[in-house]
């Protein structure tokens, strides 16, 4: 049985004081009885505060992006070593907002995934089709290309901690959720693809999260699908109350 993993992608939200309030609230609601693994991904500027606040907590945390070099003349970038130095365990890579707004390519994402793994950061590797691609009927093709290119040159043993997040771009921040059937269909396709590329063993173990307008009202239904192993939550993770309800839905 794969353990459910619920991650909150704060995106470009929350200054230090909002970080302190949100994490303080989450800590009250997440106890030893919480079955899912819970991850928060605040902005870079809040990571050190997050590390301090989560010192004795079961809540895990990560960053939303990183560059693939360790250091150097890369103005404005953050390295894996910097993330490690503030205690990050996870890093979101290949988010559709990075792909579209910041023109990140599959090959750049592949370099980032390789570097993250080398530094023992666990990637949350995002894939997903646009509305146009879905309407053209090329959802599987797009997801297959993103998975193959993103994981190129990475061995099975290196993937033991990688999480895949299927986030249909048309469902992100739009209030339009994929139906549980639409999501399950892609999750099942991706799991079979991992089996073809690697092994049945890895396919059975790998965690595939769904992301895109996950809310307390739809979380239970999505998380009850056999191939949906968790959620990557945007808007609804910014309020402790709604994020905790989604976490409860995984119990
Ligand atoms: O992009 C997302 C998480 O990474 C999803 O965002 P929303 O939950 O706001 O749609």
Image (spheres, rainbow, N blue to C red):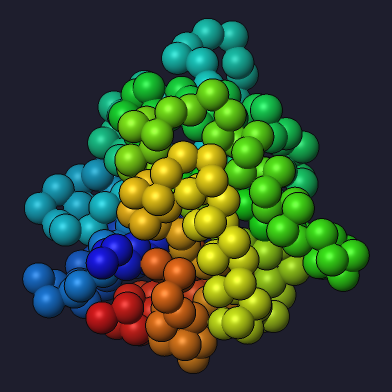
* Residue at horizontal 72 percent and vertical 34 percent from the top: 105
* Residue at horizontal 40 percent and vertical 50 percent from the top: 200
Q: Is residue 251 above or below residue 11?
A: below
Q: Quadrant of the C terminus?
A: bottom left
Q: Quadrant of the N terminus?
A: bottom left
Residue that protrudes farthest toward the bottom in the picture:
217
Residue that protrudes farthest toward the top in the picture:
72
Is residue 139 visible to the viewer in this orientation of the structure?
Answer: yes
**Quadrant housing residue 26:** bottom left
Give the total number of marks visible in the rendering.
Answer: 0
| Residue 136 horizontal/vertical position (percent) | 90, 65
**Between residues 116 and 202, which one lies in front from this camera angle?**
202
Q: Is residue 111 above or below residue 40?
A: above
**Quadrant housing residue 47:** top left
Q: Is residue 165 left or right of residue 137?
A: left
* Residue at horizontal 45 percent and vertical 14 percent from the top: 70
| Residue 250 horizontal/vertical position (percent) | 32, 78
């Amino acid at each position: 049985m794969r353990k459910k993993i619920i991650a909150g992608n704060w995106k470009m939200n929350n200054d230090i004081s909002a970080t302190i309030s949100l994490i303080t609230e989450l800590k009250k609601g997440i106890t030893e009885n919480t079955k899912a693994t819970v991850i928060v991904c605040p902005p870079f500027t809040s990571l050190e505060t997050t590390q301090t606040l989560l010192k004795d907590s079961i809540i895990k945390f990560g960053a939303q992006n990183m560059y693939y070099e360790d250091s150097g003349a890369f103005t404005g970038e953050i390295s894996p070593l910097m993330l490690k130095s503030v205690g990050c365990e996870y890093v979101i890579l290949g988010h559709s907002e990075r792909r579209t707004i910041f023109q990140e390519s599959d090959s750049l994402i592949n370099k980032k995934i390789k570097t993250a793994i080398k530094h023992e950061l666990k990637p949350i590797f995002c894939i997903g089709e646009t509305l146009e691609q879905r309407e053209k009927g090329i959802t599987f093709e797009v997801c297959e290309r993103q998975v193959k290119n993103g994981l190129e040159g990475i061995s099975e043993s290196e993937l033991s901690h990688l999480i895949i997040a299927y986030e249909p771009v048309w469902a992100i921040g739009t209030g339009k959720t994929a139906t549980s059937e639409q999501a399950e269909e892609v999750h099942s396709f991706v799991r079979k693809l991992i089996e073809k590329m690697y092994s049945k063993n890895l396919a059975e173990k790998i965690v595939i999260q769904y992301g895109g307008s996950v809310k307390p009202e739809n979380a239970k239904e999505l998380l009850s699908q056999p191939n949906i192993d968790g959620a990557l939550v945007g808007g609804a993770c910014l309020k402790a109350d709604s994020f905790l309800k989604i976490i409860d839905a995984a119990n």
